[in-house]
């Protein structure tokens, strides 16, 4: 026991309690950010940290981008707010057109809100309204099926369809009861020894089909999934063919397919939409984070042509609305971020640097006895830690291993910011960290990230084992 550590913890809690902010942890003395420049964050205590995850995979251009700042400023000076009853703005129209066109005809209209959670709420209501407008025979469709170890947002509707046990736990009695969950596609933990990808897909799809049957297929509005599971599992792509098979089940029962691309979308995995790599377009899609790259709170929903057609033929009104929906400053930031991604051909960089990052992470950390699995796509990589590599045994929950690694990463000798997570469901945990640098990351920076992470992981477990 280190008495100075106890003092430090005491002082930390004391400082935290003098804060007026209702922080997520009331006893933690949060580090104060003063500036962001490129891929670096400056802290009030003088530290300079390489931001290797863009917060929670939000930053896609790094910080201090003047082009985006100028676009936002110009918009605020032109018109900072747009009431949605009679008005629109050219910036909202242009952004939505850009998003719709980026889907090559799959999607019909876009809806802009301020956060991923709001986007998911809008998606749930859109799915329900679609069936209300479709025909009286479809009015029984009130249920949603999603997956365990998923995260779709923190508001009550989004939380209800999500499978994040910790975030649900205290609110379980007040969550919507019309949702249920099936297993995620998580080959590292879910695939049986010797099972082929096809057999694994068949097993998961049978489970989904059984769930439709159990709840009544005619009562299901939609199946919801992240094409690559972000914070809840740590950048887990599905095995090939999984989403095609899932879509076939939805079609068989007339339910919609909602993809939550809040974390994995808007270029993060090397294509603007992660579903492009699955060859499966959803009926409704949410997006956020890298849409505005952190420059403004902005997110949204895309609705397929089929969904839009039914609404247009029906009441022609989407019964939903926020005071700040389609906010001009948010739209301006998003539009400029997306133009920069296009002008600087950054998706190609995501793919090339992603391959390098994957290769180097495997070389440096793949054989580490406490690294169970490294997986991801593009610039979206998760490293899962295990207490026993052969048995894939996770660390005890109370050790908060992922959190402790990330916190240690902020120490001067590493100066790296990565994002922690613990997939928890069915008693299975999986401490992981997310590495998701900006889309304009350079080769030397990838080498630096892997070196810093390698030293951090080596030191962390060496000290833990003493
Ligand atoms: N969906 C996914 C997949 C997410 O990762 C998140 C946030 O992490 C959300 C939804 C909620 O987004 P927000 O935190 O912007 O409300």
Image (cartoon, helix red, strand yellow):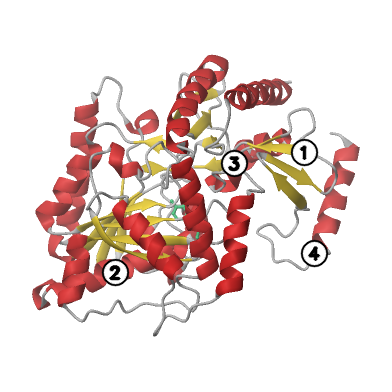
| Circle nearer the viewer, 3 or 1 | 1
The CA span between labels 2 and 3 is 32 Å
The CA span between labels 4 and 3 is 24 Å
The CA span between labels 4 and 2 is 40 Å
Q: Earlier in the sequence, mark 1 or mark 2?
A: 1
The CA span between labels 1 and 2 is 44 Å
Relative depth, front residue between 154 and 165: 154
**Which residue is painted at 44% across and 71% down in the image?**
174
Residue 230 can be seen in this image: no
Return the residue at label 3: 419
**Which residue is painted at 62% across and 58% down in the image?**
70
Query: In which quadrant will I find the N terminus?
Result: top right
**Could you tell me if the residues under marks 2 and 3 are in contact, i.e. CB atoms within 8 Å?**
no
| Circle nearer the viewer, 1 or 4 | 1
Q: Earlier in the sequence, mark 2 or mark 3?
A: 2
Describe the element under mark 4 as helix, strand or loop: loop
Q: Measured along the vertical axis of the image, is residue 172 above or below residue 389?
A: below
Q: Earlier in the sequence, mark 3 or mark 1?
A: 1
Return the residue at label 2: 126
Query: In which quadrant will I find the C terminus?
Result: top right
Q: Position of residue 81 (x, y in %)?
A: 53, 76
| Circle nearer the viewer, 4 or 2 | 2
Confirm if mark 3 falls within 8 A of ligand 1. Answer: no
**Could you tell me if the residues under marks 1 and 2 are in contact, i.e. CB atoms within 8 Å?**
no
Describe the element under mark 1 as helix, strand or loop: strand
Return the residue at label 1: 48
């Amino acid at each position: 026991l280190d008495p100075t550590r106890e003092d430090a913890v005491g002082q930390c809690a004391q400082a935290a309690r003098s804060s007026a902010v209702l922080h997520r942890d009331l006893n933690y003395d949060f580090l104060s950010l003063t500036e962001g420049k490129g891929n670096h964050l400056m802290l009030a205590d003088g530290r300079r940290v390489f931001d290797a995850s863009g917060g929670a995979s939000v930053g896609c251009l790094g910080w201090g981008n003047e082009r985006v700042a100028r676009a936002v400023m110009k918009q605020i000076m032109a018109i900072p707010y747009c009431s949605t009853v009679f008005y629109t703005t050219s910036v909202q129209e242009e952004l939505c057109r850009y998003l719709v066109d980026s889907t090559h005809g799959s999607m019909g209209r876009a809806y802009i809100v301020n956060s991923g959670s709001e986007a998911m709420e809008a998606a749930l209501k859109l799915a329900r309204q679609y069936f209300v407008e479709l025909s009286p025979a479809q009015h029984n469709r009130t249920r949603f099926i999603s997956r365990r170890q998923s995260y779709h947002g923190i508001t009550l509707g989004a939380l209800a369809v999500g499978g994040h046990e910790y975030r649900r736990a205290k609110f379980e009695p007040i969550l919507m009861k019309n949702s249920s969950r099936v297993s995620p596609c998580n080959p590292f933990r879910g695939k049986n020894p010797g099972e082929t990808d096809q057999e694994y897909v068949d097993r998961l799809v049978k489970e989904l089909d059984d769930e439709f049957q159990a709840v009544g297929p005619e009562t299901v509005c939609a199946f919801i999934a992240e094409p690559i599971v972000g914070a809840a599992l740590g950048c887990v792509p599905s095995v090939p063919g999984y989403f095609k098979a899932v879509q076939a089940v939805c079609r068989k029962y007339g339910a919609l397919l909602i993809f939550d691309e809040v974390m994995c979308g808007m270029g993060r995995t090397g294509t603007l939409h992660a579903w492009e790599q699955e060859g499966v377009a959803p009926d409704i899609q949410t997006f956020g984070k890298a849409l505005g790259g952190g420059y403004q709170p902005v997110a949204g929903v895309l609705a397929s042509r089929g969904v839009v057609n039914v609404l247009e033929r029906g009441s022609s009104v989407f019964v939903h609305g926020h005071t700040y929906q389609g906010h001009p400053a948010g739209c301006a930031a998003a539009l400029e971020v997306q133009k920069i991604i296009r002008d600087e051909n950054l998706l190609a960089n995501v793919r090339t640097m992603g391959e390098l990052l994957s290769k180097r992470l495997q070389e440096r950390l793949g054989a580490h006895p406490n690294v169970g699995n490294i997986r991801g796509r593009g610039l979206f990589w998760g490293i899962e830690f295990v207490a026993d590599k052969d048995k894939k045994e996770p660390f005890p929950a109370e050790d908060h291993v992922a959190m402790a690694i990330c916190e240690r990463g902020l120490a001067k000798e590493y100066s790296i910011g990565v994002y922690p997570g613990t997939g928890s469901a069915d008693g299975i945990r999986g401490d992981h960290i997310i590495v998701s640098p900006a889309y304009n990351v350079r080769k030397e920076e990838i080498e630096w990230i892997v070196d810093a992470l390698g030293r951090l992981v080596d030191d962390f477990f060496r000290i833990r084992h003493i």
